[in-house]
Amino acid sequence: MSTVSQKVVAVIGRPNVGKSTLFNRILGSQRAIVHDIAGVTRDRHYAEAEWAGRSFTIIDTGGFIPRSADVIEQAVREQAKMAIEEADAVIFIVDAVAGPTPLDYDIADSIRKTEKKVLLTANKVDSQKAEPAIAELYSLGLGSPIPISALTGRNIGDFLDLLVKDFQTEGVVEKVEARTNLAIVGRPNVGKSSLVNALLGRERVIVTETPGTTRDSIDSTLHCNGEEFLLIDTAGLRKHAAMKESIEFFSTIRTLRSISRCDVAVVLIDASLGIEKQDLRIISEVAGRKKGIVIAVNKWDLIKQESSTPDPYLRLVRRRLRIFDYAPVLFISATTKKNINRVLEVSKGVRDQREKRIETHTLNDILLKEINASPPSSGSGKEIKIRYITQVKSSPPVFTFFTNQPTLIKTDYARFLENRIRKHFGFDGVPIVISFRRK
């Protein structure tokens, strides 16, 4: 059995060459909202894209608010370098009409120092008559320019074929059946590397007080109570005083890579700060990829206890989790090692829940009674009947409900069905997929 670590594609280039236009064209969307990263002055965007059955994460690196022309050039160069370093493939966009500029040459110099796959993309070539204009771009030293028009969609299909043609052969990680792939994720300086070190019982990962110390995602194998775990320590980024925005953004991209490789993600929360918006974004990413979720409230030793139990704090956490309140919550200290073995124990339990299958007759015997007692309403006067239920897969669990009106079932009723499944069958820490089909 194997899992694929999703490829990351960075769209880079100087301002106003069409980066966001191409980003939207690839997504088939008219606006690049997708994700707004906390703490970034002008939004950076990333999204999950797919072409010819191959999925990848694409990032739009545009958007700067510098204070002078010199800062613009510095920011563009630094952003390009960081994008190149993080990506598996780079789309370098140049304005074919304007021709190469000094900034384009600076970016090209950085690209030539890497062995990453690079597509030199000549944008704004709206017709075949305009293609001779790309000849000057050969001077960038990055091979043949690919003429496209991000605005009209010209040559985009051929361009994407070139981009993804070798994605399916890379990034394969062999997975041992009995092993739990465990990603440790969270905001900077929340204690991810400290937790990994505490679990391993040795200094496997460098730990400092500076956010973003971890340079690359580091995998460590751990055996505990007859179980094998692969600990994936989420990579951070080296600290650049003037590059805080980009560091936070690319840290998020690295977190997504780690999540894509895991069975269960342990989301670390700083007990002194509580659950913040960025924590919820990370949890949402884990749930969106249908991975198991464990919430670990770290630095619990620093909290003054007003009660002999963490119950009051737990109630606050549950309220903040909202639709993710099915995730188990642990209170730990990576420094004192309080409850850290529970992280492994609970994560293994979540993995088992994620792989669980419920017999069809059991589902129907129990859930149809609940459905008949509280049937769905369509709002249009049409009667909705759910006649049959089956679990079609596990890891993640997917349940299909056969009904006469699949398009009329509302989101809140799907949530009701999910809650009924959890009430009777568990699936703690596991996102559940519910689909409706006509019967």
Image: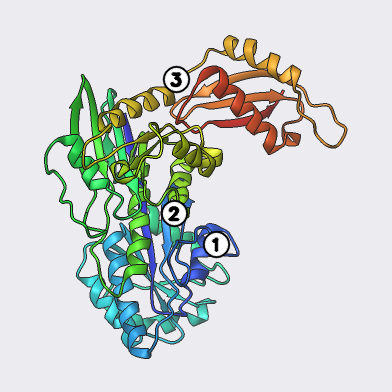
**Picture residue at 69% right of the left edge, 32% below the top:** 413
Direction from residue 18 to residue 9 in the image, left or right: left
How is the protein colored in the picture? rainbow
Q: Quadrant of the N terminus?
A: top left
Q: Which residue is mark 2?
A: 278
Q: Which residue is mark 1?
A: 33
Q: Quadrant of residue 263?
A: top left
**Picture residue at 18% right of the left edge, 55% below the top:** 208
**Residue type (three-letter) at the residue carrying disc 1:** Ile
* Residue 359: image location, x then y, percent: 53, 12
Q: CA distance from mark 1 to mark 3?
A: 36 Å
Q: Is residue 8 above or below residue 340?
A: below
Q: Give the camera-side residue of 100 and 349.
A: 349
Direction from residue 334 to residue 420 in the image, left or right: right
Q: Give the camera-side residue of 279 and 377.
A: 279
Q: Residues within 10 Å of mark 2 (few under 14, many from 20)?
A: some
Q: Which residue is mark 3?
A: 356
Res. 78 mark: none
**Picture residue at 45% right of the left edge, 36% below the top:** 314
**Residue type (three-letter) at the residue carrying disc 3:** Lys
Q: CA distance from mark 2 to mark 1?
A: 16 Å
**Residue type (three-letter) at the residue carrying disc 2:** Gln
Q: Is residue 438 above or below residue 131?
A: above
